[in-house]
Image: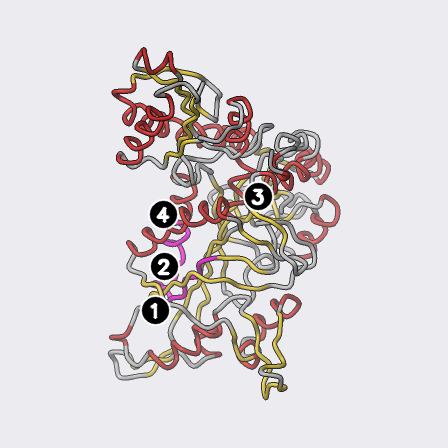
Amino acid sequence: MAKENQFVNQIADIETDFPRWYTDVVIRTKLVDYGPVKGTMVIRPYGYAIWENIQKELDARIKATGHQNAYFPLLIPYSYMTREAEHVEGFAPEVAVVTVGGGEKLAEPLVIRPTSETIFGEMYSKWLQSYRDLPILINQWANVMRWEKTTRPFLRTSEFLWQEGHTAHATEEEAMEETMKMLGVYKEFAENCLAIPVFTGRKTEKEKFAGAVATFGMEAMMHDGKSLQAGTSHYLGQNFAKAFDIQFLDKDGTHKYAYTTSWGVSTRLIGALIMAHGDARGLVLPPVVAPVQAIIVPIAAKKEGVLDAAADLKAKLVAAGVRAEMDATDNSPGWKFNEWEMKGVPVRIEIGPRDIEAGKMVLVRRDTHEKTEAPLADAADAVKKLLADVQHNLFEMAKKRKEERVVSAETMDELLKGVEGGNFVKAGWCGCRECEDKIKEQTAATARVIVEGEHAEKCVCCGKEAKQVVLFARAY
């Protein structure tokens, strides 16, 4: 047995040591390995295949809303970062800087992109001439670097992969419409592809993106009741337009500054998948993004005709659009069951001599472990229907957890009790930064999003009149 597989089933208990469970799962299922530089990760083929499926689904949605893909440089002149004061202050602690190139000290230090508002702003100022050039709708798939002190694979690493959209518009209304549209795209993608129901809403001033007028976030509830910021959409107003002189000649013959937005999601979504759906046996992957949707395990594989029948079944499923694989290794069926369960494959298909003789197959779904039988003649339809059922059920289970684990609080004691119980907590807030800081200090919970359309009488912290209702939670 291979060295790295011999303890494949030894993962920490998900209920008593969730952080260790998470680390065990990402390593044992070969999603990632640790890179040689502290805080970096090597995304292995199985993990990268999940990212490719995320890319495929999300890229189609981004393009459907009129955006085009491009690619911008990894290295950004340091002076660009200093043009927008709030932006440089927000990112300064995370910036990695190149000072030597080709064995010589550089005339100007170069930043390894932590985000690309500045380089996009520089180029947009060159490309934008008149109102006829608007809107500019560009997205890029790229890597970024942020010098994180505390790291965990997928959730927070020094280098990670993402997409970042950057757009320019003629009016504030158009830019705000874009900001909310892309937040909606992310929400639909999270729920229909990742099977993760999310909370969306505006961030507080403290939690907003450095340099933005307003940030809107997408928050997902994990198995342990903590929140994971799964995506953000920023309305930048004219802050970057003025910093980078992004102007256009309008219809009335006057020069005006454009209004810009930016929005993005990253490989952190893989961490969300793991922590939202995983169980005591390991990964549980939604079929839409699972690298392998159905794994065929031959039973009594050495008997004549079994491997041929399994290979024929795989060919039929692949032809029908199912990402199917066959495990023809010499490991025992029980070992294979455990291995593929840990990898989160949505459907396992067992086929042996008796099944072949009876013209059937055994189907085992990963989400409920329920076993059913289906005719081999209807294999493709049966598997595709089961995959759809698994996708739907994963969303419904996550939705139930989301609905059951939101509580309200009117006092700090109630807020603390709520988050310690693994819940998200709705509470009134006066809008004061001092109260927001005090809530974090006393409960380790932060403001995730402002809840629209709800009202509270008093601030949970100071007791003064509440201006907003906020969703608080401990977060990754």
Residue pointed to by mark 3: 471
Q: How far apart are marks 1 and 2 (CA)?
A: 9 Å
Residue pointed to by mark 1: 169
Q: Nearer the viewer, mark 4 or mark 3?
A: 4
The answer to whether any part of residue 49 appears in the image is yes
Q: Foreground residue, 73 or 233?
A: 73
The answer to whether any part of residue 239 appears in the image is no
Q: Which of marks 3 and 1 is nearer the N terminus?
A: 1
Q: Which of marks 3 and 1 is in front?
A: 1
Mark 4 and mark 2 residues within 8 Å of each other at the beta carbon: no
What crowding class fits label 4: few (fewer than 14 Cα within 10 Å), some (14-19), or many (20 or more)? some
Q: Distance between the residues labelled 4 and 2?
A: 20 Å
What segment carries the magenta color? 162-185
Amino acid type assigned to the residue bearing label 4 in the image: Glu
Amino acid type assigned to the residue bearing label 1 in the image: His
Q: Earlier in the sequence, mark 2 or mark 3?
A: 2
